[in-house]
Image: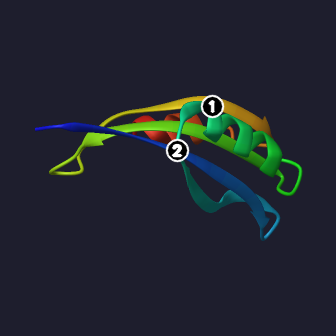
């Protein structure tokens, strides 16, 4: 059972007058995810940089950490990560 760490950027867009998830992009490093999220926040209502740790074989989520948030992010976004 090996753990795999993935860094990604989650964008947020306005759909039907509500803020919701947009596209996701992978990043090679933690600092890369933060830089990309900050840059993308200028083109989206909001973004978040995340570190996801999951079991490499089963895909079971070990942890999800918000590294940084830029712009507008839904109030319940952090709660949704822990499920």
Q: Residue at x 68, y 38 (%)?
A: 75
Q: Secondary structure at mark 2?
A: loop
Q: Is residue 5 visible?
A: yes
Q: Which residue is mark 2?
A: 28
Residue 50 place in picture, x, y as percent: 54, 38
Instruction: Judge whether 16 appears above or below 44 on screen.
Output: below
Residue 26 in the image: above or below residue 65: below
Query: Residue shown at 59%/57% (left/top)?
Result: 25
Quadrant that contains the C terminus: top left
Task: Tally the marks.
Answer: 2
Residue at left 58%, top 58%?
24
Residue 77 vertical position relative to residue 66 in the rendered view, above or below = below
Whether tag 2 and tag 1 are in contact, CB under 8 A, the answer is: no
Badge number at residue 50? none
Q: Which mark is residue 31?
A: 1
On the question of residue 76 being in view, the answer is: no
Q: Residue at x 72, y 43 (%)?
A: 37
């Amino acid at each position: 059972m090996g753990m795999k760490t993935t860094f990604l950027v989650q964008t947020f867009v306005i759909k039907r007058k509500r803020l919701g998830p947009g596209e996701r992009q992978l990043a090679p490093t933690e600092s890369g995810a933060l830089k990309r999220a900050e840059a993308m926040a200028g083109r989206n209502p909001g973004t978040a940089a995340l570190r996801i740790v999951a079991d490499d074989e089963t895909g079971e989520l070990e942890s999800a950490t918000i590294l940084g948030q830029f712009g507008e992010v839904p109030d319940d976004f952090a709660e949704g990560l822990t499920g």
